[in-house]
Amino acid sequence: MSNVANTKVIQRLQVLANGLVGSNSVAGFKGRVEFMSLAIKHDLVDDITSYSLWDSGYEGLGERSVDTCFEMGDSEEVIAELIRKARAEGFISAVSGFAGSSFERWCSYADRQASLAF
């Protein structure tokens, strides 16, 4: 990814972290899914959780940003949507790496949600 594209992704993550991620609304839910999707897809989770992006001037991008995505009472739904999006957009192996030993359980959230829709 070019530096310009990477900068745009990081700027979008910063906007999400400083606004929607902590919102208890439909827009907040979508923001949490988008935040985690971008962070994982573009291999930025470690840069966020280590505060290296914050230290580089992207205030608000830190470990709490990632944690908040899973602490708003809708973590199973966020995970299910993240898995569906990763499958559709081809970054499921990156999600597997992030989720580690929880990956199978994470996939079950998406699969369970899909079966409830019918």
Image: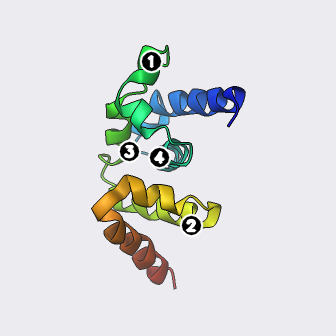
Q: Nearer the viewer, residue 71 or 6?
A: 6
Q: Is residue 45 in sight in this rendering?
A: yes
CA separation, marks 3 and 1?
Answer: 17 Å
Q: Choose the circle earlier in sequence order: 4 or 3.
A: 4
Disc 2 and disc 3 in contact, CB within 8 angstroms: no
For label 4, the residue is: 36
For label 2, the residue is: 87
- The type of residue carrying mark 4 is Met
Q: Secondary structure at mark 2?
A: helix
For label 1, the residue is: 59
Q: Nearer the viewer, residue 97 or 49?
A: 97
Q: Nearer the viewer, residue 60 or 100?
A: 100
Within 10 Å of the Cα at label 4, are there few (<14), some (14-19), or many (20+) other Cα atoms?
Answer: many
CA separation, marks 4 and 3?
Answer: 7 Å
Q: Secondary structure at mark 3?
A: helix
Q: Choose the circle earlier in sequence order: 1 or 4.
A: 4
- The type of residue carrying mark 1 is Glu
In this view, the mark in front (1 or 2): 2
- The type of residue carrying mark 3 is Cys
Q: Secondary structure at mark 4?
A: helix
Which residue is rendered at x = 44% and y = 71% of the image? 110
Disc 4 and disc 3 in contact, CB within 8 angstroms: yes
Q: Where is residue 19 drawn, in percent x and y? A: 48, 30
CA separation, marks 2 and 3?
Answer: 19 Å
